[in-house]
């Protein structure tokens, strides 16, 4: 039995991460791949049932995983993300959520055939979208920052309130149907929710203060943060079921507010984010693999399909359009937000809890809750996953340009390089803290950012969404190294480059192969030499490749510096200190070489 549990956990973890990778490779929404993988493992092929295998550990493991994911999402929020649309976000998470609750409950009663009691419980739960589903979709769709921020904030803020709405409806029903219960029973509910809020805020502030005072060593900060998240969630759950998510959300929001004063909290978030990606994969496969074939078969009935369609095409658009009347959102932004509302892990886990509770109390239709929830989850995940990007393109809310390049450091060479990249329709942005150094770029109409690229507020002042590669090209090698180290988690290690250091062959021999991958062009392509050349008789020129692998680094003249390759089909490939680069017929090799004499 122990081996079976061990194998099950490893298989689920492995398939979850593989699903994320496969989704990235084939450019599918990762949530869709994970759902399909879970269904294949569980109800379709019947290889194993995680709920039966894990037994009593099943629900606690999922609850703790959801708590970590929710904390990661809320702690990454920054109010500057919604600058200009804060009114819209507030309306969506308040008025919009209330309309969605009422309209969804009525749809569950009149279309799915559930009783009013069960309908208002499940209707409250269905207001959630949640970070476990919305963030992977946003990562894949690459929306404009405003619209992405609105959807992310809605998912994270509303996520803990969906279960609370369901729980509130359940408590009201108990007061109305059980003679021995009175209004003070509801007061206990609100008091418990308030305690969860206070508890989450207190732990968030305590952790922030302890980190700022250096009470924890650097290597223990991330594990201690994770431990406090689990303690916060568990303590709130002990006080009242389903308030744990509220507590960790408040804790995350508290840390998000204080991290501008405590810089190391931002570093901890990278650790939690990595765990969150793994847990998102795991819990989705756990839940879908645990479904029965009977539950899957019940989906394809007219009442359930009808309910899902009404939720997609009537309830969601109606709640968004009404709640955002007179706000900052444009018609196209309202249309996109009104379409996107995938349900996920929270809806599936909490509906199972309420289904068992309501069936035990004999409520009509309670047995349909799991089927109804999975139908809504799977259909919305597939529908929104495959249509979000195309719809965003149609509405002009997606970036269709080729992947751009962010250049840190304005100089004669970097400006010339940026100008040449634009000839191939590659978006370029030059960032520098000196207004004087940026004048040459401004004169050529090259987009610029005047400011410190390492400042925390930069990601909110500048839209970095169009750029997938960063080049640190200042004259300070240490600063260049710091820039690529700071931005590697965001751009990826394969998309961060800097200029080599001083032209010292002994020094270059000490650079290991992994670091050479991140050093640009050639060993003598240092800052001063590149700028000397571009300011004298050298210029950027194009060599058309007419035969595969005919041109190599070794057979180029010694004074020619290879810069990048314009691939015939796959955009731009920057050249680094790796010894070899592949050139296909039809490629264009851009080099720095002497101008031809006239």
Image (spheres, rainbow, N blue to C red):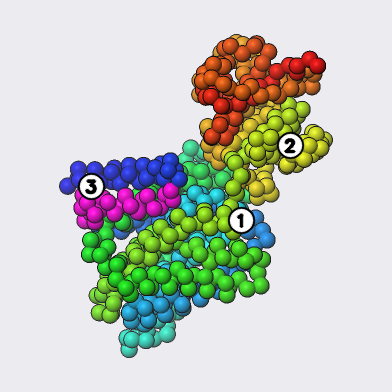
Q: Residue at x 74, y 31 (%)?
A: 415
Residue beneath disc 2 = 432
Magenta-span inclusion, residue 39? yes
Name which quarter of the figure residue 550 lies in: top right
| Residue extent of the magenta highlight | 28-53
Residue at the spot 59% in from the left edge and 40% down from the top edge: 403
Task: Tell me the mark number nearer the camera, choosing from 3 and 2.
Answer: 2
* Spatial CA span between label 2 and label 1: 30 Å
469 and 253: which one is in front? 469
Question: SS of the residue at dot 2?
Answer: strand
Q: Is residue 193 above or below residue 569?
A: below
Q: Main secondary structure of the magenta part?
A: helix
Sequence-earlier tag: 2 or 1: 1
CA separation in Å, label 3 and label 1: 48 Å
Location of mark 3 (residue): 5
Picture quadrant where residue 21 is located: top left
């Amino acid at each position: 039995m122990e081996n079976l549990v061990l194998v099950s956990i490893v298989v689920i973890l492995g398939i979850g991460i593989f699903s994320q990778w496969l989704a990235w490779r084939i450019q599918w929404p990762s949530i869709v791949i994970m759902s399909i993988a879970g269904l294949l493992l569980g109800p379709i092929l019947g290889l194993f049932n995680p709920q039966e295998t894990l037994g009593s550990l099943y629900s606690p493991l999922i609850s703790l995983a959801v708590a970590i994911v929710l904390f990661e999402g809320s702690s990454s929020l920054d109010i500057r993300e919604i600058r200009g649309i804060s009114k819209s976000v507030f309306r969506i998470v308040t008025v919009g959520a209330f309309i969605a609750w009422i309209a969804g409950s009525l749809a569950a009663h009149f279309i799915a055939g559930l009783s009013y009691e069960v309908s208002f419980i499940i209707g409250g739960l269905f207001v959630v979208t949640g970070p476990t589903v919305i963030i992977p979709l946003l990562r894949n769709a690459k929306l404009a920052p405003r619209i992405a921020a609105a959807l992310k904030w809605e998912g994270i803020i509303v996520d803990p309130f969906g279960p609370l709405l369901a729980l509130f409806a359940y408590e009201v029903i108990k007061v109305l149907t059980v003679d021995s219960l009175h209004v003070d029973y509801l007061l206990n509910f609100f008091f418990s929710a308030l305690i969860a809020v206070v508890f989450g805020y207190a732990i968030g502030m305590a952790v922030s203060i302890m980190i700022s005072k250096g009470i924890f060593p650097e290597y223990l900060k991330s594990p201690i943060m994770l431990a406090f998240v689990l303690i916060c969630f568990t303590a709130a759950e002990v006080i009242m079921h389903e308030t744990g998510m509220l507590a960790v959300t408040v804790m995350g929001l508290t840390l998000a507010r204080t991290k501008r004063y405590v810089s190391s909290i931002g570093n901890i978030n990278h650790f939690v984010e990595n765990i969150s990606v793994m847990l998102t994969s795991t819990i989705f496969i756990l839940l879908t693999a645990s479904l029965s074939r009977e539950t899957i078969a019940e989906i394809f009935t007219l009442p359930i399909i009808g309910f899902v369609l009404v939720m997609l095409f009537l309830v969601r658009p109606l709640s968004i359009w009404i709640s955002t009347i007179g706000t900052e959102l444009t018609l196209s932004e309202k249309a996109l937000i009104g379409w996107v509302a995938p349900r996920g892990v929270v809806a599936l886990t909490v509906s199972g809890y309420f289904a068992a509770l309501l069936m035990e109390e004999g409520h009509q239709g309670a047995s349909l809750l799991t089927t109804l929830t999975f139908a809504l989850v799977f259909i919305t995940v597939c529908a929104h996953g495959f249509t979000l990007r195309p719809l965003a393109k149609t509405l002009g809310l997606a970036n269709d340009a080729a992947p751009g390049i962010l250049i840190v450091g304005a100089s004669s060479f970097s400006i010339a390089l940026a100008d040449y990249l634009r000839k191939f329709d590659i978006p370029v942005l030059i960032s520098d803290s000196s207004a004087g150094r940026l004048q040459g770029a401004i004169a050529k109409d090259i987009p610029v950012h005047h400011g410190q690229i390492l400042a925390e507020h930069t990601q909110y002042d500048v839209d970095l969404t169009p750029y997938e590669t960063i080049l640190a090209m200042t004259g300070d090698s240490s600063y260049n190294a710091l820039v690529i180290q700071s931005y590697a988690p965001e751009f990826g290690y394969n998309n961060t480059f800097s200029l080599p250091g001083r032209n010292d062959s002994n020094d270059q021999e000490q650079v290991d192969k992994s670091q050479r991958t991140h050093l640009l062009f050639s060993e003598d392509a240092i800052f001063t030499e590149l700028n000397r050349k571009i300011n004298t008789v050298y210029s950027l020129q194009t060599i058309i490749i007419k035969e595969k692998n005919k041109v190599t680094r070794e057979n180029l003249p010694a004074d020619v510096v290879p810069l990048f390759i314009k691939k015939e089909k796959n955009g731009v490939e920057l050249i680094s200190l790796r010894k070899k680069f592949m050139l296909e017929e039809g490629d264009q090799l851009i080099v720095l070489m002497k101008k031809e004499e006239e």
